[in-house]
Amino acid sequence: MNIVELLTQLGLNIHGYNYLEQNGVLSKLFALVEDDEDQMTVKFCEPGILKFFGHMAHWKPTELLLKYPKIFDRLFANIESGDLTIVGITLDTLGIIGVTTEGKCALKSTGNKITYALKTIMKLLTSFPTDIKLRALKCIENLLSASGPQPIVSQITMKWFSLLTDQPMDVIVKYAKNPFSEIKLAGLGIIQTMASQQWGQEEIKNSPGLVEYLLDRNIEVIKECKEINTKSLSFCLAVSFLMNLL
């Protein structure tokens, strides 16, 4: 696995990625994961290869989806794996791919597959142990994130949010109010990324008691949580102010 880790470091920049692709390294590595006849090799190599794939797909998600669609299929299937190590790495990988605009577009192009994956993550969230739960919440945060006002991204993230569950805001608020600081921070992280988008601001404002909760400085004692609350409200207030000017 040290070799895969070294290759991952090489592929973290675009020149390294191009070198690996041109020399057939990517296709050879991904073939190992698809080898149904050698399950021992797959079990041993898959965690490192999935990490590697996530970093490579962060650079060129559309290209990798076209060349290696079975790896994406494996990621979606892995969410329901009984191996929690694989589940955690899969959630990390989907988050790494889906944090960029091109990554979101690539995942969106898989249609029902990403829809099923989103619903499955939310369905299993309560049953995950804490460490996997945190990685699942971070994955959701990355998938719902937006770097700047991009209409196409906003459309994707709003759609994905609505697909999570029947009442996604209720679920997210529940985690944002969790008494355990790590889980609370993860829930608030999702609210913060929603607050940077107009549809998310509407969800926050329409969630009963949420704005009051974020405003109440006496409730929150954790510094990081206070900072997220303030930032989330700042996004919402800034947009409300601008809308009133128009």
Image: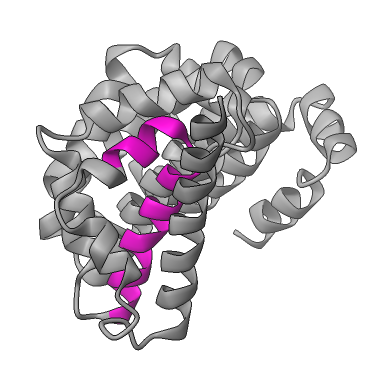
Query: Which quarter of the rendering shows the C terminus?
Result: top right
Which residue occupies 76% across, 54% down? Answer: 9
Q: Is residue 55 left or right of residue 190?
A: right
Q: Which residues are magenta?
A: 181-203
Residue drawn at x 56%, y 36% is 242
What's the magenta bit mostly, secondary-structure-wise?
helix
Task: Let me know if residue 114 is in the magenta part.
Answer: no
Count of residue discs = 0
Question: Does residue 191 show up magenta in the picture?
Answer: yes
Classify residue 131 as left or right of residue 237.
left
Of residues 66 and 215, the one nearer the viewer is 215
Q: Is residue 90 visible?
A: no
Q: Residue at x 17, y 58 (%)?
A: 209
Q: Position of residue 193 (x, y in %)?
A: 46, 48
Q: Would you say residue 52 is visible in this rendering? A: yes
Answer left or right for 82 relative to 105. left
**Quadrant in the rendering for residue 221:** bottom left
Residue 176, placed above or below residue 163: below
> In the picture, residue 126 is in which quadrant?
bottom left
Tell me: residue 94, above or below residue 48. Answer: above
**Residue in the foreground of this view, choosing between 44 and 64:** 64
| Relative to 111, residue 41 above or below | below
Q: Residue at x 40, y 14 (%)?
A: 110
Q: Residue furthest right?
A: 15
